[in-house]
């Protein structure tokens, strides 16, 4: 086990010198998580807005289910994706298991409920405020969804950032479907777990520093977007 002081010094040196292994791991982490958030947004934004606008039998059950899915255990998601992509699974012939694509799928499933639930609440609040105006203008359900999504764009960006924070920090699902293979599927969280177990604290701390910086950056972006949204509302 390395001395803590030496380990921190070595970790900062890895970050400052842009160590190739560290940059490769960080780059893969960002690509996987950003792809997962984009895919989750394509599903979650219209789904959440549709649930906010539409009224149908069983809507209450659908909302309860959606809110419950926000607490999906990552390891359970990883197991389900693993079974689906394994050789005996329905998508086994595609050969996606232990690839970055498998990790994108797992993270996307985890992020979709967050994006959809926040979108539903945000759009429903706006609908209550503008419902009469939209009806007077003869805006149909599809047009209402598009209008409210655009009007809520700043608030919805915070939902996407929250989803990115969930995705980038995920370890349970991605280690199951990705396998933590060096130079193939090793991302920051899985690398930190592995290097810590090996006693190589320098790389683990270096990655931890970057992960913490990303978390701070995401929170700062959320605050900035909320401030911008507040100014836009009073403009």
Image: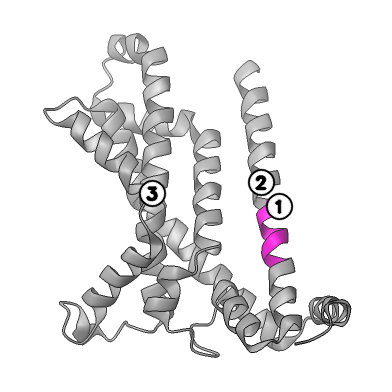
Q: Position of residue 181 (x, y in %)?
A: 49, 89
Q: How far across and how far down the image is residue 35, in percent?
A: 46, 65
Q: In the rendered structure, which segment of residues is drawn in magenta?
A: 210-217
| Tag of residue 8 | none
Q: Residue at x 69, y 69 (%)?
A: 208
Among numbered discs 1 and 3, the one appearing first in the sequence: 3
Whether residue 33 can be seen here: yes
Q: Secondary structure at mark 2?
A: helix
Distance of mark 3 from mark 2, alpha carbons? Answer: 20 Å
Is residue 215 part of the magenta span, yes or no?
A: yes
Which residue is label 2 attached to? 219
Residue 40 is left or right of residue 21, and the answer is left
Q: Secondary structure at mark 1?
A: helix
Spatial separation of the CA atoms under disc 1 and disc 3: 23 Å
Contact, CB < 8 Å: mark 1 with mark 2? yes
- Circle 3 Cα neighbour tier, 10 Å, few/some/many (<14 / 14–19 / ≥20): few
Q: Is residue 107 above or below residue 138?
A: below
Residue 148: x, y in percent? Answer: 40, 28
Q: Quadrant of the N terminus?
A: bottom right
In the picture of the structure, the residue carrying the numbered disc 3 is 71
Q: Which residue is mark 1?
A: 216
């Amino acid at each position: 086990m390395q001395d803590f002081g030496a380990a921190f010094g070595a970790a900062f040196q890895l970050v400052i010198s842009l160590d190739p292994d560290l940059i490769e791991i960080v780059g893969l982490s960002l690509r996987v998580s950003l792809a997962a958030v984009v895919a989750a947004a394509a599903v979650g934004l219209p789904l959440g807005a549709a649930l906010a606008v539409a009224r149908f039998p069983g809507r209450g059950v659908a909302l309860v289910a959606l809110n419950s899915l926000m607490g999906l255990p990552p390891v359970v998601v990883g197991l389900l994706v693993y079974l689906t992509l394994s050789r005996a699974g329905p998508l086994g012939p595609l050969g996606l298991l232990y690839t970055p694509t498998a990790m994108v799928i797992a993270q996307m499933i985890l992020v979709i409920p967050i994006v959809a639930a926040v979108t539903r609440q945000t759009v429903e609040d706006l609908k209550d405020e503008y419902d009469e105006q939209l009806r007077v203008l003869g805006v149909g359900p599809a047009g209402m969804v598009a209008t409210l999504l655009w009007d809520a764009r700043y608030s919805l960006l915070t939902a996407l950032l929250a989803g990115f924070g969930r995705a980038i920090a995920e370890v349970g699902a991605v280690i199951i479907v990705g396998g933590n293979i060096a130079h193939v599927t090793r991302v920051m969280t899985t690398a930190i777990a592995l290097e810590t177990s090996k006693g190589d604290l320098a790389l683990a701390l270096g990655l931890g520093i970057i992960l913490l910086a990303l978390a701070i950056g995401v929170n700062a972006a959320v605050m900035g977007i909320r401030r911008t949204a507040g100014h836009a509302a009073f403009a």
